[in-house]
Image: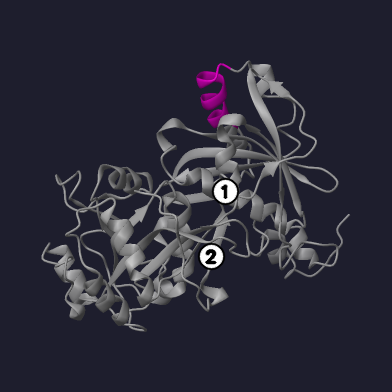
Amino acid sequence: MADQNETAPAAAEDASRIKSAPHPDGGIVFVRPLRLDELPLAEAVTHTQLDPSVGSVNVAATVLKHNQESFWGVFRADDDAHTNARFVGYLSFLFLNEKGEQHLRSNTLNTRVPDLSCVAADGEPAEIIYMWSFVIKRLASIAIPLVAFGLGASYAGLPLCATAATEAGLRALRGFGFTPMRDGHEGVGEQYWLGGNTDKPKVENAKRTNPMHDRFKVKVATTGDEVQMAMAIRAAAFLAEQDCPYEEEFDGNDYTGTHLIGYVDGQPAATMRIRYFADFAKLERMAVLPRFRRTLIARSVVKTAVDFVRRKGYRKVYGHGQKRLLRFWAQFGFKPIAKNVPLVFSDHEYVELVGELEPHPEPLTIHSDPYVLIRPEGAWDDPGVLDKSSSRPATNPH
């Protein structure tokens, strides 16, 4: 998927439609809906990777006029002000209505020249999202979540379907958890989906959840069993794989911090430890079991950890990143700290990293509801057992 260096045409951009994230090599990646006059950029980058006969700019324009959410551009820029913004790829979608879903399931949907009667127009409900095409060089793991966020609640929870046009595209789909739509039909040219099944019940839009996120759950370890589960994941990753000595991995800090556990399809898959200092929180001991490393669970764990410490009022996070993983941490805004000194332990070279956080809109403070402050860690918005006990009259037993 070729990296283009074309400068994006100037646009009166709606800031609310722009979603951005740090690029691992510096600067930022941002996405936004494409305009009609920008479709030639998408056509040019398509022809660098796919057969030139794949679609046409005229067909694309017809779909975009029908639904203005259909094309999202991916751009790189030097900074948050979008200095030197460059078009580097795009994603396009067919938001299929009930008729379109029926054609998709029966394998009769014309994806080369879509029948617009199968596609939801602006403001109309859709039943399934067909990822029409996506051409993004090494940025799928950043761009796809950004676009999902940009599409918003109107399309949240809809099953996603895509056809793997190249081997690279197939690897990307599998990495996101897509599975074959039809038994026995795998490989390039076959349809894959996420969050779908052959007997999908009708669900109201308001009750839908995001299938991309339904597979990945992260929670705070609040029982002894869960803490042991976190340690077991670390033992598998660090002791077994990296041959780390036991006393170096289990360093005496496991009962002084918070442990997160990430689940994939209900299976324990990843963990991270958080410890707290005066003006920063430290993220450490992150581990992912080998069979889950091509999923998004690592991103989910880090995002949950960052949101967790923001809620506690922290504005700065600190950590030690192995040199080979600096690109991963850069996705979350972590940068090498200015005072970096050579840091080697347990046979690996590390770099000190720091991330500056936006303030949480509802941080926990001494002025928070006292019932909130006695709830289980991470479950501050859910009434706990002590909330319920307040319904009993105070007897002040001795």
Q: Residue at x 16, y 48 (%)?
A: 183
Residue 250: % across, % down = 67, 24
Distance between the alpha carbons at the discs numbered 1 and 2: 13 Å
Please tell me whether residue 270 is drawn above or below residue 214 in the rendered image: above
Q: Amino acid at mark 1?
A: Gln
Residue 170: % across, % down = 28, 45
Q: Give the residues drawn in magenta, as a range.
A: 231-243
Quarter of the image holding residue 92?
A: bottom left
Secondary structure found at label 1: loop
Let me know if residue 39 appears in the view: yes
Main secondary structure type of the part rendered in magenta = helix
In the picture, the quarter occupied by the C terminus is: bottom right
* Residue 329 lies within the magenta run: no
Residue 384: % across, % down = 67, 61
Residue 206: % across, % down = 43, 76
Let me know if residue 195 appears in the view: no
Please tell me whether residue 153 is drawn above or below residue 30 in the rendered image: below
Q: Is disc 1 surrounded by few (<14), some (14 to 19) or many (20+) residues within 10 Å?
A: many
The residue most toward the bottom is 123
Q: Earlier in the sequence, mark 1 or mark 2?
A: 2
> In the rendered view, does 103 fall on the left or right side of 357?
left
> In the rendered view, does 396 fall on the left or right side of 322?
right
Q: Residue at x 32, y 49 (%)?
A: 173
Q: Amino acid at mark 2?
A: Lys
Identify the residue under disc 1.
Answer: 331
Q: Are marks 1 and 2 in contact (CB under 8 Å)?
A: no
Q: Residue at x 22, y 73 (%)?
A: 59
